[in-house]
Amino acid sequence: MAEPSIITLDAGTNGTRAMLVAKNGRVLAQAYRELTIRYPQPGWVEQNPLEIWEKSRAVLGEIFYFATSKGYRPEGIGISNQRETVVAWYRSSGKPLCPAVVWQCRRTARQ
């Protein structure tokens, strides 16, 4: 019988990390990809939404592969993200309208 486990995905500002965690809390495997941060002008902070998506998929793929090849049975997933980072998407195509405006960006701050 496969051992139960949980997958975590942390889509942070600097990178995206996925982990496979055993029922007792022990980390069984982890994968990480760094994310590019752009500063197009003073006070502006942006990221490529497609890069965030692709790197999240990549780390999840690594963890799923490890889990299935080692006999673990993921029973759930926990997700944490940047929360205040904003992305607008075209409904019709699923493509981003513009770069992600990262939570540190000051363009909406009172002047």
Image: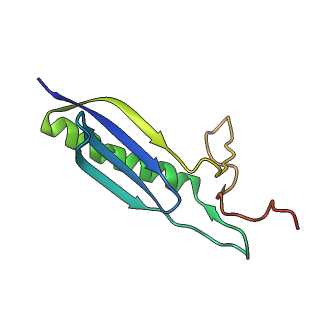
Residue at the image point whose x is 73% and y is 72% from the top: 43
Q: Nearer the viewer, residue 95 or 51?
A: 51
Up-down relation of residue 4 to residue 27 (above or below): above
Looking at the rendering, which quadrant does residue 46 occupy?
bottom right
- The figure's colour scheme reads rainbow
Residue pushed farthest bottom?
A: 42
- In percent of width and height, residue 88 lies at 69, 46
23 left or right, relative to 18: left
Residue at the image point whose x is 19% and y is 35% from the top: 68
Up-down relation of residue 7 to residue 34 (above or below): above
Residue pushed farthest left?
A: 1
76 left or right, relative to 83: left
48 left or right, relative to 27: right
Residue at the image point whose x is 69% and y is 54% from the top: 98
Residue at the image point whose x is 60% and y is 47% from the top: 83
- In percent of width and height, residue 38 lies at 61, 70
Looking at the rendering, which quadrant does residue 89 occupy?
top right
Residue pushed farthest top?
A: 1
Name the image quarter holding the C terminus. Answer: bottom right
Q: Nearer the viewer, residue 33 or 48?
A: 33
- In percent of width and height, residue 82 lies at 57, 51
- In percent of width and height, residue 65 lies at 23, 42
